[in-house]
Amino acid sequence: MALKTLRDPDAILADGLAAIRAQFQVPAGFPPEVEEAAAQAARRPLDDHADRTALPFVTLDPASATDLDQAFTIEAAGSDLLLHYAIADLGWFVRDGDDPVDAEA
């Protein structure tokens, strides 16, 4: 199986996206309070979630994706195959209401 990759040697896509960001005044980064809230969420203990980080997941997203939010792994289970599918639990990381990440989004 071959992976399909997107190449942009002349930076046409990159330059086009930069022009769109400039036109609509999309900032290049996030405010410090948003970065800190995201860092705190990433450190939150997984008390009510099963830890599956030992499984060798591969992403379903294209090579150019910046939001790797879904993945799978397949393992042998006797004479069967067991598919594990994972998708990001955004609601666990970003709280409704006064969360700086929610407000920034």
Image (cartoon, rainbow, N blue to C red):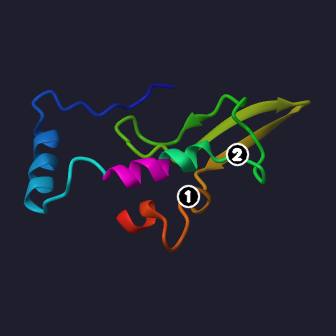
Where is mark 1, residue-wise? 90
Of helix, strand and loop, which mostly describes the magenta segment?
A: helix
Q: Position of residue 61 (x, y in %)?
A: 46, 42
Residue at horizontal 63 percent and vertical 33 percent from the top: 57
Instruction: Determine the secondary structure under disc 1.
Output: helix
Q: Residues within 10 Å of mark 2 (few under 14, many from 20)?
A: few
Where is mark 2, residue-wise? 45
Asked if residue 34 lies left or right of residue 74, the reply is: left
Residue at horizontal 15 percent and vertical 54 percent from the top: 21
- Closer to the camera, 1 or 57? 57
Instruction: Determine the secondary structure under disc 2.
Output: loop
* Start-end of magenta stretch: 31-38
Residue at horizontal 61 percent and vertical 56 percent from the top: 89
Q: CA distance from mark 2 to mark 1?
A: 15 Å
Q: Position of residue 48 (x, y in %)?
A: 78, 54
Quadrant of the image for the C terminus? bottom left
